[in-house]
Amino acid sequence: MGCTAHDVITALRAGAAVVAEHRDELNQLDRAIGDADHGENMDRGFRAVVSKVDTAAPETPGALLKLTATVLISTVGGASGPLYGTAFLRAAAALGDTAELDGAAVAKALQAGMEGVVARGRAVIGDKTMVDALSPAVEAARTAAESGNGPAKVLAAAAEAAHRGVQATEPLVARKGRASYLGERSAGHIDPGARSTALLLSAFADAVRS
Ligand code: ADP
Ligand code: MG
Ligand code: MG
């Protein structure tokens, strides 16, 4: 079964819920290698997304993701706002006005989103950023879609790969963002942006499945 605008709204709500639930955890991860505000930033952003979606729900998945992008860019602040904003904007552009997404469309949107993050932030895999969660997620999504899976399984595969990517950030020395100011001392901690990426993908997967 395809993923409709209704499913995207459900997914965005689930994303907001998971971010709210993990707000303190994300702040704590950011306290270790940044400025302790990642949970706060993401919670502010996704709360705003949900309240915007409540008042003016657009009619296609792409339009919803575009709205999400503009709200995140204007409310999140910090490095993660423009990065997530660009991800949702590129994902929206990749979908155009498709009304119902199959697994391949979801995989394509994820890929476009990651390309947006890379274009904006210039991080490569191993720099200890959200790209370390996104990149394996995109790969897993593509493989799942190529095997003929629908949106729920594609997102579930992406989420699982993202969570493995999060764990892989722990020993890394940060080379981008605020954490890079710490140099070697950034090693031994999980990257907060990678963690929020994996949490969002899990929430999206669960929302689309149910
Ligand atoms: P800030 O660092 O401005 O306080 P946040 O705490 O909200 O912003 O977000 C920090 C996260 O942003 C990091 O954990 C990392 O995943 C991500 N990030 C920072 N810089 C980059 C970059 N250049 N490319 C990709 N992700 C980045
Ligand atoms: Mg921060
Ligand atoms: Mg900050």
Image: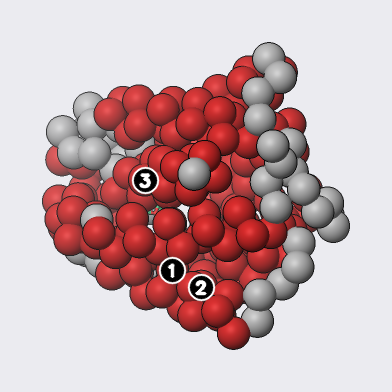
Residue at the spot 74% in from the left edge and 36% down from the top edge: 102
Q: Residue 167, position in %: x, y?
A: 28, 29
Closer to the camera, 147 or 109? 147
Q: Between disc 3 and disc 2, whose residue precedes?
A: 2
Up the image or down, 100 lies above or below 47; here it is above
Q: Which residue is mark 3?
A: 199
Residue at the spot 61% in from the left edge and 54% down from the top edge: 7
Q: Residue 27, position in %: x, y?
A: 20, 60
Amino acid type indicated by mark 3 = Leu
Badge 1 marks a residue whose secondary structure is helix
Classify 10 Å Cα crowding around label 2: few (below 14), some (14-19), many (20 and above): many
Q: Between disc 3 and disc 1, whose residue precedes?
A: 1
Up the image or down, 203 lies above or below 45; here it is above
* Mark-to-mark CA distance, 2 and 1: 5 Å
Taking 88 as reference, is 105 left or right? Answer: right
Identify the residue at the far right of this view. Answer: 97
